[in-house]
């Protein structure tokens, strides 16, 4: 494969509502760290397009702390009508006030389950900053990974009553209970995610709800052993 297609991510779109810019790349190569078929639109407060840069290539120049565009055209528009008012070709164009992080751009719209804890933290911080409606899904996953630290302790707490009673209970009953507990945990997780997505509870609280429910169940099992 050509270098620009190694590790390529296709149809990358990124909205920066704080700076009022919308980005799009036909593809972005993780190998060359460049975007190809780039387009950046500047918007007014009413989110009407005022200008657009189109370029064959674009990349973030860390040394100069800005974005470089190559082989493209700079367009300007009348926001009220959308009429094209200017078109200026360029071989190279540097925009020092464009500071968007290309790594963050690649995280947007990826499934939460495909992101690491650190990637989720970076994305959640950005989504909180811009007030994105996508925040709850990623935040629940992020806080859920943190909450999973206590998961093994809860499993042990539930397993102890099972082990104590296992000598006098039919093995099939134990298997049925295990399946039931797994299903209950799945239901609690789905319910918590739904509540967070609807804004009923905070994502951080929703992430702990399944673990809290299973912890209460473990306490109930211990109480029954008395």
Image (cartoon, rainbow, N blue to C red):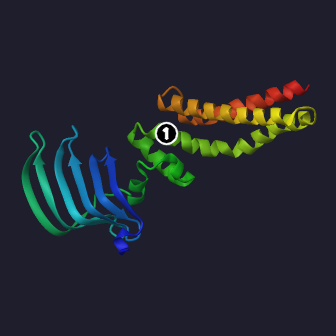
- Which quadrant of the figure has residue 46? top left
Please name the residue shown 41% across and 48% down the image.
109
Among all residues in the image, which is located at the extreme bottom?
2
Please name the residue shown 11% across and 43% down the image.
82
Please name the residue shown 48% across and 32% down the image.
197
Percent position of residue 4, x then y: 34, 71
Percent position of residue 70, x then y: 22, 69
Q: Is residue 3 above or below residue 214?
A: below
For mark 1, what is the residue? 137
Give whichever of 5, 103 is nearer the camera: 5
In this figure, what is the number of numbered marks?
1
| Secondary structure state at the residue bearing disc 1 | helix
Left/right of residue 72 with respect to residue 87 in the rendered view = right
Q: Is residue 205 above or below residue 143?
A: above
Left/right of residue 30 with respect to residue 154 in the rendered view = left
- Which quadrant of the figure has residue 101? bottom left
Q: Is residue 130 above or below residue 27?
A: above
Percent position of residue 33, x then y: 38, 67
Give whichever of 23, 62 is nearer the camera: 23
Left/right of residue 54 with respect to residue 31 in the rendered view = left
At label 1, counting other C-alpha atoms closer than 10 Å, the crowd grade (few under 14, some 14-19, many 20 or more) is some
The quadrant in which the N terminus is found is bottom left
The quadrant in which the C terminus is found is top right
Give whichever of 196, 188 is nearer the camera: 188
Percent position of residue 114, x then y: 52, 52
Please name the residue shown 67% across and 31% down the image.
184
């Amino acid at each position: 494969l050509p270098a620009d297609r190694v590790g390529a991510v296709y149809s990358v779109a990124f909205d920066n509502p704080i700076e009022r810019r919308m980005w799009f790349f036909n593809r972005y190569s993780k190998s060359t760290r460049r975007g190809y078929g780039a387009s950046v639109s500047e918007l007014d407060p009413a989110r009407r397009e005022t200008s657009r840069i189109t370029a064959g290539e674009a990349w973030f120049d860390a040394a100069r702390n800005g974005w470089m565009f190559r082989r493209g055209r700079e367009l300007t528009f009348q926001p009220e009508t959308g009429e094209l008012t200017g078109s200026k070709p360029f071989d190279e164009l540097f925009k020092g006030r464009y500071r968007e992080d290309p790594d963050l751009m690649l995280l947007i719209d990826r499934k939460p389950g495909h992101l690491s804890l650190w990637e989720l933290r970076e994305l959640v911080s950005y989504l909180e900053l811009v007030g994105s409606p996508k925040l709850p899904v990623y935040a629940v996953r992020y806080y859920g990974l943190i909450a999973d630290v206590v998961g093994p302790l809860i499993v042990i707490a539930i397993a102890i009553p099972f082990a104590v009673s296992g000598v006098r209970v039919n093995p099939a009953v134990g298997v049925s209970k295990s399946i039931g507990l797994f299903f209950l945990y799945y239901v609690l997780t789905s319910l918590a995610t739904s509540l967070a997505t609807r804004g009923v509870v905070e994502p951080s609280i929703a992430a702990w709800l399944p673990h809290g429910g299973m912890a209460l169940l473990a306490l109930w099992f211990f109480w029954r052993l008395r």
